[in-house]
Amino acid sequence: QVQLVESGGGSVQAGGSLRLSCAASAYTARICVGWFRQAPGKEREGVAVDVPGGDRTMYGDSVKGRFTISRDVAKNIVYLEMNDLKPEDTAMYYCAAETPVSCTLVPEMFLYWGRGTQVSVSA
């Protein structure tokens, strides 16, 4: 059982930045942790995942070059640095965790989820 708590959401203007945090109850060095988002009326989509132990990350096409996922193993926290935010980034952002073998951008592959943090970007 892995418990996840997101924080850092808020309201910003287009072009601004936010850093989301995901505090995990498990040792993050050994689990896959990802960020996903869901806007009203849309399906949940993969934003970024961090594969443990291999320095490998994956990003959704719409956020490549703007968002960065990283983890602080000592603190069991995974971050999502979001720069050059756009109105279309507005969504509820969720942190999720799973075993490394299931580390993809597909939400259905993740078992453990946080409750989410809202990000709103105005034009």
Image (spheres, helix red, strand yellow):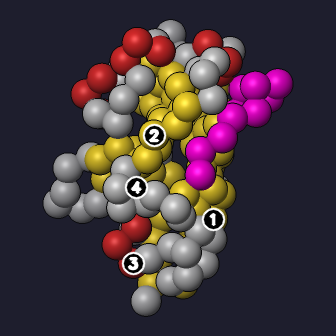
Q: What residue is shown at x 40% (from left), y 67% (from top)?
A: 89
Seen in the picture, residue 36 relative to 53 is either above or below; the reply is below
Q: Magenta stretch: residue 72 in it?
A: yes
CA gap, disc 4 and disc 2: 20 Å
Q: Earlier in the sequence, mark 4 or mark 2?
A: 2
Q: Residue at x 36, y 61 (%)?
A: 62
Residue at x-position 43% and y-position 89%: 123
- Residue 79 falls left or right of residue 96: right
Measured in 3D between alpha carbons, the distance from the residue under mark 4 to the one under mark 1, in whole angstroms, is: 13 Å
- Residue 92 tag number: 4
- Whether pointer 4 and pointer 2 mark residues with C-beta atoms closer than 8 Å, the reply is no
Q: CA distance from mark 2 to mark 1?
A: 19 Å
Q: Secondary structure at mark 3?
A: helix
Kindly check if marks 3 and 1 are in contact, taking CB atoms under 8 A apart as contact. Answer: no
- The correct choice, above or below, for 38 with respect to 106 in the image is below
Q: Which one is closest to the eye, mark 2 or mark 3?
A: 2
Q: Residues within 10 Å of mark 4 (few under 14, many from 20)?
A: some
Tag on residue 58?
A: 2
Residue 38 picture location, percent across and down: 31, 53
What amino acid type should be assigned to the residue bearing mark 1? Leu
The earlier-in-sequence mark between 4 and 1 is 1
User: Is 120 positioned to the left or the right of 88 in the image?
Assistant: right
Mark nearer the N terminus (3 vs 1): 1
| Dot 2 or dot 3, earlier in sequence | 2
Magenta stretch?
68-77
Asked if residue 7 is positioned above or below residue 76 in the image, the reply reads below
Which residue is at 36% across, 29% downward? 104
